[in-house]
Every structure is written in C-alpha cells, then in structure tokens.
Amino acid sequence: CELLEKGVAAIFGPSSRYTSGIVASIAARFNIPHIEYVWREREKKKNQKKTSPSMTINIFPASEQVSQAIADVIDSMKWQKFAAIYETDEGLSRLQKTLTLKEYPIIHTVWKLNEGSDYRSILKKIRHLPVCNIIIDVKPENIMKVLHQAKEVNLLADYCNFVITYLDISMLPIAKMRNNINTTVNITGLSIRENDVENIDGLDSMVLYDAVFLLHKALETLNERNSKNKVYMSIDPIRFCLNKTAKLYKAGPNIVSVMQKIAKKGKITGNMYIDKYGRRQRFNVKILNFQQSDVIQMSYWDFNGIHATQIKEKKDIDLHKFMKEKIFKISVKISAPYVMEVTDGSTRGELIDWKRYEGFCIDLINHIADHLGFKGVVFQLVNDRYGFYDSQTKTWHRGLIKSILNNEADLAISDLTITSFRESVVDFSLPFMTSGYSIVFSKPEKQTSSFFPVLIKVWLYMAIAYLVVSIMLFVQARMAPDERNNSHHLCNADPEELKNNFNFKNSFFLTISFFMQQGSNILPKASSLRMLASMWCFFTLIVYSLYTANLAAFLTVDKMDPPIKGIEDLPKQTKIKYGALKGGSTAAFFKNSNYSTYKQIWAVMANSRPSVFTSTIEEGINRVLNSKRQYAFLMESTTIEYNTERKCDIIKIGNVLENRGYGIAMPRNSPYKTHINHAILRLGEKGILQNLKTKWWNNKGGGLCKKDEMEKNKSIYKLEMANVGGVFFILTCGCSASFFIAICEFLWNIRKVAVIEKITLWEVLVAELKFAVNIFAITKPVKIAKRSNSNISFREGGLDRAVSRA
C-alpha cells in the first residue's frame, strides 16, 4: 500500500505463491499491470466478472506447457517405468501434471527429499529398485548435491537415465562432474536460455530481465501509437490514495493489452508470446545431454513437439572412445551349438568359471568386439533358463533376462528368441539368425519294403476287369462267325459242322496270358475280339509299367510314414504326446497365440499329466528317443537342424512355423545398441554370420546322418485309383466299342446266311441265338435246314451226347 501511494506503473512479483493472489487482486482493482516471473500453476477462475479483467501477466513459461515438454522428453526416451524425486509442492504439481499428460504403465515411486542436506538414504532405496530412470525436480541449489550423493551410492551407473526439470540446466556444473564419471549414465536437462550476453545467473532472474524488457517495449509501442494518432494518454505512474476515493490507472489496461499483442524475442529466454489469459505460450526449450567431454543440444521442444538438432557424430565419437576403455560383461547360457563346454582338454574357447567354453555365440561376440574395438569381454555363465516370468508377482526370475534387468551384464546372448514380451523389459539387437518352430520326432524302425505297392482297392478293380474282359471274350466269340473253325480241315474240306475254340478255359487263359505279357496259340480272328484283346493289352501294359516303377521306388527308398506330418496334425490325434521347453519362447508362442489350433495345442500341453514340458532341450530330445514314437518335442528349427546332423534317430516333421529372430539382449535404452546393430549388419554383409553357422552346424561334427526322402519332402505313395482311373476308363470304352462291333458282325452274318440258305431272317436269328446262349455247345452246323431237326453235339466232362433240336 505504501508503494502504491508513492506511484507505480507496474508491479513485478512477488515470488511467493501465497501472496501472489493478494497482489493480483490489488492490481486488478486499480488497473495496474501485474507481471510475474516465476512458475505458477494455472488456476481455474470461477465467476470472474467482465468488469474486473485480470491485469496479471506471467512471463514464466506456462505450467501446462512445461509439463507437456517434460512428458514429451520422457516419451522420446521410451520410458515405461521411472522414479521421481521432488522437493517442493510446485515440483510435485509439475510431476502430477506430467503424469496426466501421458499414460505410463507403471510409475514405480515418487520420493520427497527429506529436510537437511543428506539424501543418501533415499538414493540408496532408489538404487535397489528394478528401474534406473529418474526424474529430478528439486530446487536449483540442491541439484548438484543430489547428483554428487547419487554418485557416492553408485546411482550414476551404466544404463541409468536422469531427467532434470530445471529450465536453466546449462548454468549448472554438471558437465564438469560428468567428466569424472567413467560410466554411460545419461543425464538430460532442459533450458530456456538462448543467450548469455547479459551474464545473468538464475532462472528467475533471467525471466525477470525479459519481463522488464517486454514492459519497456510495450511502453515504447504505446508512446509511438499515441504520437501517431495524436492522442495524449499519460503512461506515467500515478499515486494512489487508499484512504480516499479509488483512482484507477487509465494506461494500465492499454499496457497489458500491448504486452499481449506484441510478439518479442526476449534478450535471454527467447520468444515471448502472451495469450489472452496472460500466460506465456509458444516458447522453445532446449534439450541438453551431458557427455563425458561436453554438453550438447540433442533437440529442442516447442508447442509442436520435439525436433532433433544434434548431429549424432559427436555423441557416437564419445561413445566409441568409451567402448575402447570398457570391459563388457556378457551373460551366456549353455545350449549347443551356441555355447558348449570344451571337453577334450583343449585351450581353445573362452575361460568361464575355470572351464573353457566355445560355440557360435562365443565367436560372434568376439567378432563384434573386434569390430567395435572393445577393450575386452568377460563371459559369465547363467546355469538356468532364458528367463522365467512369474505372472503372480509380475517379476522375472533367473536366466539371461534377469541378469540384464539386474544390470549384472551389459549383453546377454544365446539362442534367445526376440519376442514382444521380452522386448517390453529389455532391448534387443537386430537378429543375427532367424528360426521358427517345428517338431522333432523319432524315426521309425527300418521296415521291409512292400512287395505290392498298390492299394487293395486297385487290385480289386483289376480282378473285376479281368473277369469282365474274359467273359466278354467268351460271349463275343460265340457271336462272331469268324471264330467258327473247321476242326477236320485236313481230311474234310467241306465240313457239316464248325467248332468254336473260345470256351471258358481258353478265354480266361488268353486274358491272363496277355496280362502276364506272354503269348498264346489261340488268337482271335474276328474284328470285335481283336479290338477287345488290343484294349486289354494296352490296359495291362500301362498297369504293368506303373507297378514296375512303384515297386522299384519301394525297393530303393524305405518309406517313413509318420502319424503326424506337421504341427496342425497334433491336436487331431491323442496317441502321441507333445511338449516344449518350460519357460521358452516356443511354449510362450502357443500360450499367447489367438489361433484356435495353437490354443488347443497349448491347452493339451498345459493339462497333460505327467508334464510334457522339459527343463532343457537335451532332456526333450532324449525323451523323444526313449518314448518309442509316443512323444514329439516342439522347438526352434535351427536347433533341430543342429541335432539332426548328429543324431540319426530323429527327424524334423512338417514346415517351419512363425519365423523369429535370435538377438542380443541388453538393458533398455542401451547406448551400445546402434553400434552392435551396425556390427551385426557388417558381419552379415561379409558373410561371417553364414560362415559361423556352417562351422558350428555342419563342420563341427555335422553331416553324420544321410538325408532320407522324408527330409527332402519326397514322399512315395501306393498306386491309387486316382493314378490309374484313366486307364480303366479307356478299357471300358474299348470294351463297349468291341461289343458294338460284335453285334454288328452278328447281325450282318444273319442277313448273309438268310440270303444264302434262302430262309427268313427270323429263323437265322433264332438258330444263332440258340447257339450263342447254349454255353456248353462247342460245334455248330454249317447250314440251317428249314423246318428240320438238326443235331448239335457238345462235350461236357469228356463225354459226347446228342441233343435233338427242332
């Protein structure tokens, strides 16, 4: 009040949020511009009267925009969990606002600094959390204290990430302290300082400086406008008398309006845009990263989000120098041929726990180390699974994944499949090998090849065809006049009777002779019989050729016909049990699949008693070998390839399902990920990855088993009707045609006899039909006597009998 009586043109401050509201009310009462320069949370004003407009302008960046900037920085770093440290209520408010802007799966904990200068107890608790992403929102004078004490408790370690929300981080001596820390800890900070020409220290001071600058520009603009419009409006401060009638500052609203409308770049903090609510919007925030040798600007934030500005060469050079001075810890798991113990007493391989180990992954890490120039690598053995996740406690136990989460290793490598579930807690490199899921099953015992590689159905149809053709041959021979021969042609050139040689025995014998590719002294003369015999010979030729080809194939290759031919066949049967590695990616694939068949497979495995899951791959393969083809093991195809090269009693069944990659696991946001990916790409381009696979799959003890026809997917099947159906169709057509010709010959012969003997066609037809129907008759009179009896002799059982015919 005393200040108002002396005369004021504007009020700056106060810094305390408790008295700020009082000052704002007084300023609004007398139309005095009220300019703030510290962080204020946006207040929702209710029932604000239009007659009392706000005279308050805050040059400090708007609270919701600052929280948005922090949220975007965290989002760009792909944090899913973090711990937060705050000191003041304003800091807690900023964190709460940040969390409402982004949806984070888990916020581990929020800690408030205790009173005093010793924060080690809190920092030690954070050190033992399974997360090392930390937000620091404390008073600027305590930031360095927190960092120094974090260093003392080993919290500034590899793979730890810090975000400091103080908006003038560049003025703190973090770079100097960072230079004395030989780790890859990532410290990121924010800064709105664009110029340092005025040498002003402190965030509030530089914002206040720009606030005065903006007020000065507003007064200049207002003076110029008054002069141009020839309007006099005093902008000089006036004295307010609180004891008398209130006197308003007429220029106040104009000053506030001009400050809101002009857009100026501050001397220190950059762009200043004031919205109609008196808040500063559309400002820029530098995102700084503190390296070992320097502080660099990685990007900047504005109302459109984060924009990258850093040329990454600088950061990569520093990281490359650091890698040359670092000894990397590598977690490995025994799994042939990726990591195996050297058992022949040789000094090759790497020494781990007083034993030597070798394998594909050992060689791969050594190649990567040579390519990137690692100072050295130290291997540590994980004698357990790849990593087991407990869904009840929602934590990982043991294995490669756990060693990464506990920061016990820089890298973890084995036949570790890249899955979305694992990638939610660790980072993976590019895949150095691709694999899928398939079935390993035992080979059947070698069996004697089938001597008749034809289905019974085909044999049955062939027998029917033989009977039909033989009967047709007999019937058509009795109808055909050309098949009646003179049995006494040497002594009687003009016989009274003719004999038909195609009785039942001769007809069936001729048919079987042609089927066996043999000749006969009885051959057909009639056209119809010759056509029938030709079609039968063609049929037997094709069938004989197919039979010979299939029999030769059966004698050459032992046919293995497994009861299952792929993963899709597993749920269709109940005889063969099937399982997978417990806690492995194969089991996880079927467990998490939405495909009905795979869900059914998982349900069967999960409910099987005794358990069908195994602790190791070796245990699964041994179970396959000892189960007498009653157990199948689901596993990665590359491991199946390795084992089938050495164990000849097992085979891979079916095609490869769901190609996946093997990758190198590392902590989340690992700085080495890009370099390791580049090394893997280079090794792949040079053919080193393929050479390593050939070395450990084929050359080192591989090639012991011959690939059979099943492994080549060349299956041989017995002859089916589908294979010979066309031949039966041709035979049927030929038989039908020959029967038609036989009828034509029969009718033509009737006409011919009727003309020669001068009798009616009906009499000839009756006589011919009697002979054709009487299957026991073997001779037939040459002439047919009109209305006279004719004797037709026939032989049965070697005895001659005479039958009187009318």
Image (cartoon, grey):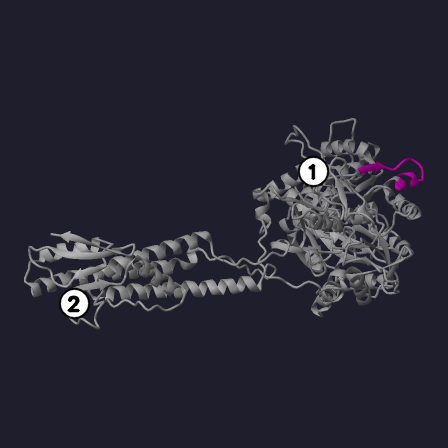
* Left or right of 396 on screen, residue 477: left
Magenta part of the chain: 109-124
Q: What residue type is labelled 1?
A: Lys
Q: Name the residue under label 1.
A: 250
Q: Position of residue 492 (x, y in %)?
A: 18, 71
Q: Nearer the viewer, mark 2 or mark 1?
A: 2
Q: Name the residue under label 2.
A: 495
* Magenta-drawn stretch contains 627: no
**Viewer can see residue 47:** yes
99 or 185, which is in the foreground? 185
**Viewer can see residue 56:** no
Q: Residue at x 59, y 52 (%)?
A: 562
Please tell me in which quadrant of the rendered image residue 180 appears.
Answer: bottom right
Q: Where is residue 744 in the image (x, y as percent from the top left)?
A: 18, 61
* Magenta-drawn stretch contains 111: yes
Q: Position of residue 670 (x, y in %)?
A: 78, 54
Q: Residue at x 60, y 56 (%)?
A: 447
